[in-house]
Image (tube, rainbow, N blue to C red):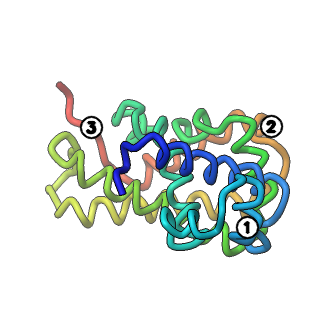
Amino acid sequence: MNPNDLRVIKTKRALSESLFNLLSEKLFSAITVNMICDKALVHRTTFYKHFYDKYDLLSYLITNLTKDYFEKDIRERIEAPFKALSSFFDKPIEKIDIKQRHDQQFMETVTAIFIQKIRQDIIDNADIIEVPGNPPIKVVARVFESAITAIGDWTYDEHKLCADYSNAIDIPDSLDKMFNQLLNIKVKSE
């Protein structure tokens, strides 16, 4: 199947939009492939020509939703990851986050996808990342993602931010400060 074929693009877009809309209405764990197909007006057989299951579609959706984040300046993503991430959230994504926050299946899947993308981002930009002592870049990537995960989990547990993120304007700055106190990862000066 040619990924550049207009029919393939339209089908994947319809399925992605269907899942995106369903995520703001129902918990991911309750969403079925049938529901996704019905909302997208796509037959189940067609769904399985493009995706293995709803997790594969979720991965595709998250990859598309995070494109803008990973196109941001690497310096911003490395030195102020929480500020970069908070500016990435818009109202539709925020609505899904609030709805899915207590769905363990969704949170584990999205976290795993996003963490893998962060890890790969560090590895792909190894030539411009500077760490004292030059440890292996794969170790740097793991430490970076672990720190982000730990601080994110701590923030959720400590602050229980259940409302929208606009109430937490100062939080990204303080989280970035904490992150930079823990880690000494920088982007090389040009």
Q: Quadrant of the N terminus?
A: bottom left
Tell me which corner region of the image, top left, top right, bottom left or bottom right, holds residue 137: bottom left
The amino acid type found where label 3 is placed reads: Val
Q: Distance between the residues labelled 3 and 1?
A: 37 Å
- Give the image location of residue 24, x and y in percent: 80, 52
Horizontally, residue 84 falls left or right of residue 77, namely right
Q: Residue lying farthest top?
A: 190
Tag 3 residue: 187
Q: Residue at x 79, y 46 (%)?
A: 95
Q: Which of marks 2 and 1 is nearer the N terminus?
A: 1
Residue at 15% across / 56% down in the picture? 133
Image: 91 above or below 101: above
Residue placed under numbered mark 1 in the picture: 28
Q: Is residue 150 visible?
A: no
Q: Badge 2, how many Cα within 10 Å: few under 14, some, many 20+?
A: few
| Front residue of 48 and 55 | 48
Sequence-first disc among 3 and 1: 1
Q: Kindly state the secondary structure of the residue where label 2 is placed.
A: helix
Image height of 157 relative to 134, above or below? below
Residue 167 circle label: 2
